[in-house]
Each structure stands twice: as structure tokens, then as C-alpha cells.
Image: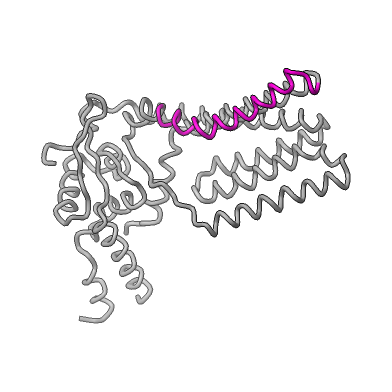
Amino acid sequence: MPTDLRGLADLDRIIHEPARLALAAILSVVESADFLYLQRETGLTKGNLSSHLAKLEEAGYVAIEKTYRGRIPLTLVRLTDAGAAAFKAYRARFKKFLDKT
Amino acid sequence: MVDIEKIEKRTVQSYYDDGLGEIALGLILFLLGGVFIAQTIVRERSAIYQALGILSIIVVLSAALLTGRIVRLLKRRITYPRTGYVAFKKKERSPKRRAVAGIVAAIIGASIAVLYGLSPSVSTLFPAVNGLLLAVAVFFFAHKVGLTRFYVLAAASAVIGIAIAAAGIGEIKGIGFFYMLYGITIAISGVITLVAYLHRYPRAAAGSLEGPDAH
């Protein structure tokens, strides 16, 4: 495999997917956000958002907390330390790859 | 390709989508300006004059302590049911940045004091100095956040400050008028933003705040 493409292949596939990358980018700036906020900002459908969050949660990149605001149920999402580190590493690797090509 | 920086910037900008912060800040500046003007109306060294001096300090202190809480309360009622809840990371300012900001503020303060000492008539320019200093601060903020309306507000600060100084209203009264006019300008900008926001985002259905059952 050419060196350039190897750099691309080394990228974290969990984060590399565009919708999950957008979610990680949003969550990297905030402390936590609820489901509605993430849905509005990403433009994803409820089902799609749920499925991408499930993948990120499975990888240990996000923590999802079911809570209540008054009597209204609320789903809060935040990037874990592992998620923040993975996002940072992904960003650095992708930048390196873009600089090379 | 996903533009990470654009998404991060947009996330920060989303805090200002509702205009609530501007409305709160605008009203505080308006109130502060009103206190300054009231001071020029009453007799100097009278009890009311002293009380107004204390009131101006109370306005500044309560602004520092209460604005954040009031904006959060309004966001809970207006913003979160429409565009969702988000909590931003608390920024820790580095000691180096704090020191630089302190030095810059000290230099500006000392320069104004020296100018005033050399020629007391320079005090007629205080509204312009206020306007320009605030314009610089708002300009840097606009650059950081990347929202056009804040550039307009930065320019408005400079224009209002210079216009009031040129009108020769006087030192304290001029500064009072500056804060009142600039406060109204910021509040109007906030109200326009809020109206547009309310039109764009109707209240979400109760279930939308909740993630799917899978979680």
C-alpha cells in the first residue's frame, strides 16, 4: 500500500464516518448536549442519530445519560476522555495525511 | 468532506442564536447609562448623588453576578425546548493571558489619566474613548465568534461614542448617553435575533428531548 494511503487507512474508522465526526466535533466544544441539540446541529434523523451515538458509545467515546429536566425526560451526551483523545488523534492524523497529499 | 473547524465554530455560535445575552447586556448598559445621567441632574455631593454613585456600583456588581443566571433561566424556558440543551465548557484563562489583559488595561487607564492631567478638557473626549475601547473589545469578540452582527455592533460602538463626543454633551452625561444608546442598540439587535429565532424554531414536541429507547 502506498504510504499516503496507509495514512488514511490508519484513521479511526469509528470517528472517520462523517456523521460521527460531526458529532465528535460538536461534543469536543461542549461539556454536554442533549439529543435535540445534536439532532438540530447535525440535521440527522432521530433514528440515524441514535444509531451513530450507539456506535460511539460502544467504542467508549461518548457517555449517554438519561435524566429528567423537571418532568421532561432528557438524554444528555458528552465526549468521554477516551473520545476526546481519539478525536484529537484523528484530527492530527488526518491533518498529517492532508499535508502529505 | 466534514469541515471540523466550521462545525466547532457553528457550535460556539449556536449559543448566540437566541439573542438573549445581547438583550440582557443591552438592558444593563442602558441602566448604567441612566444612572450616570441621573448623577448629572442632581446636585453634586448631595445624598442622592452619593446614592446614585453606589447604585452604579450595584448595577455593575449585580450585572456580573446575575446576568449569567438570568440568561440561563431564560434559555431554560425559551431556548432548550426549541433547539435543545447544551452546556459549554468553562474556559480557564491562562495566567499569561490574564497578565497581558491586566497590563493592557493598566496602560490604557494610565494613558487616560496622564492625558487628563495634562489637559482636563480632554475629558470631553471620554465618550469617544469609551466607544472606541468597547469597539475594539467587541471587534475581537466578533472575530472569535465569527458572527457578522457583532462586527456591526463593534462599529456602532465607535460611531455612537465619537458622535456623542462631537456633540459636546459633557463628560459624565456623555458617557451616560453613550451607555444608554449603545445599550439600546445591543438590546435591539438581541430582540431582532430573538424574533428571528422564535420564527425559525417553534417549540419542539415533548418527546424530542428524549433520545430513542435504545439508550
Q: Is residue A38 visible?
A: yes
Could you say where residue B114 lies in the image, as x and y percent from the top left?
81, 49
The quarter in which the C terminus of chain B is drawn is: top left
Q: Is residue B91 above or below residue B123?
A: below
Q: Which image quarter: residue A88?
A: bottom left
Q: Nearer the viewer, residue B158 or A71?
A: A71
- Residue shown at the point (44%, 49%) measured from the top left: B91
Q: Is residue B100 left or right of residue B119?
A: left
The quadrant holding residue B204 is top left
Can I make out residue B196 in this image?
Answer: no
**Which residues are the magenta region?**
B44-73
Residue B57 covered by magenta stretch: yes
User: B83 or A74, which lies in front?
Assistant: A74
Q: Quadrant of the N terminus of chain B?
A: bottom left
Residue placed farthest to the left in the image?
B214
Q: Position of residue A53 (x, y in %)?
A: 19, 48
> In terms of secondary structure, what is the magenta stretch mainly?
helix
Where is residue B158 shown, x and y percent of the image? 69, 41
